[in-house]
Amino acid sequence: MDDVTVIGGVDTHKHTHYAAAIDDHGRLLGHQEFPATSPGYDALRSWMRGHGIVAAIGVESTGSFGAALARELSRNGEHVIEVNRPNRIARRMDGKSDRLDAEQIARAVLGETSTAIPKSKTGMVEVIRTLRVTRSSAVKARTQAFNTLFGVMIGGPSHLRDELVDLTKRTLVNRCLRLRPETEDLLSLAAEPARMHLAGTKLALRDLARRWKTLDGEVKQLSSQIDALVTSAAPDLLQLHGVGTEIAGQFLVTVGENTDRIRNEAAFAKLCGVAPQPASSGRTTGRHRLSRSGDRAANSALYIITIVRMRRHEPTRAYVERRTAEGLSKREIIRCLKRYIAREVFANLPRPAA
């Protein structure tokens, strides 16, 4: 069995992973289920190697259920390929099961329809990604808390509403923190309805203000930590005009820790959705259209840089004037600038150590 070239495929789940192995001619060698634990990962790798020389292993969902498995396989020297799009034609003809999905993943690697190298999910960039996700959740919760506070205040008693309605956001929160609800009126069945309403409104506003204040402190702390990490990880990227720590952090998360998995700046442009796609057919040749694929958050970051440079960057302003004189629309000029900026960003991404 040592001279058999093995291609593996793994269909990942929360508690178990289903693996299939085929040879370089596409013949099924075996399939088996393993627990999604560290001993299970070792058993899966040993089982794969028991069929021959492992050339590559395709893993589904390397950013979620398959992240730990992909890390473990890469750490042990296996060539891991990210496979996230199932073969819909095969699924329609043959049906769906864990065994069939694992086999189709292996065949996608063998047929080179899936060639992407997964992100390493280790190191500083993974920490930045985790902190950004946490901060995004805190920002959403903070916004929801203030919207709820504002709604309660608007529907509250008139004299309380009149005191608070014209205040700015932070002043309103601070004023609500100082409210002192009469809890005896809230708990007493003999209290007047108006007094009970006032006490309940004050209590709700104070608790919502405390929640907003807690979340605001959490957002500020996470932002300072992210700024320090991004400054340390990508100092060259921050030197570009229009690139701050938020945008630089997005590019780092999009590319991942192992930036060498992006072969060239054209691949990076396609990853960001700014590579023009051919749209020729019949007698219409040389036509291209805007790409709608790629990481839309990275595409948005490129758009923000473009708008900033069109307003405050003299070389970009001169370029816009020249292309406008040539007859290009503003939308077409922005598309060209995003492609140029993608090339500049790729050249300044941090490179892994040799």
Image: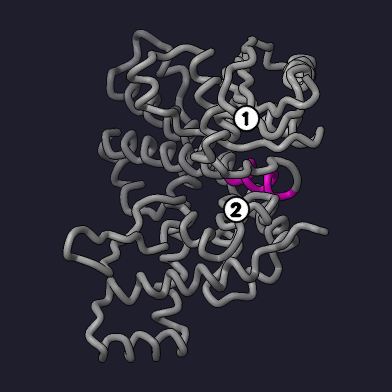
x 31%, y 37%: residue = 151
Kind of residue indicated by mark 1: Asp
Q: Position of residue 223 (x, y in %)?
A: 62, 52
Q: Is residue 255 magenta?
A: no
Q: Is residue 129 magenta?
A: yes
Question: Which residues lie in the magenta part?
Answer: 124-132
The quadrant of the picture occupied by the C terminus is bottom right
Q: Position of residue 97 (x, y in %)?
A: 47, 12
Q: Is residue 354 above or below residue 330?
A: above
Magenta region's main secondary structure?
helix
x 54%, y 20%: residue = 103
Dividing the picture into quadrants, the one containing residue 337 is: bottom left
x 56%, y 43%: residue = 115
Q: Which residue is mark 1?
A: 24
Marks 2 and 1, the one that precedes in the sequence: 1
Q: Is residue 329 above or below residue 161?
A: below
Q: Which residue is mark 2?
A: 255
Q: Is residue 228 above or below residue 135?
A: below
Horizontal side of 218 relative to 151 (left or right) equals right
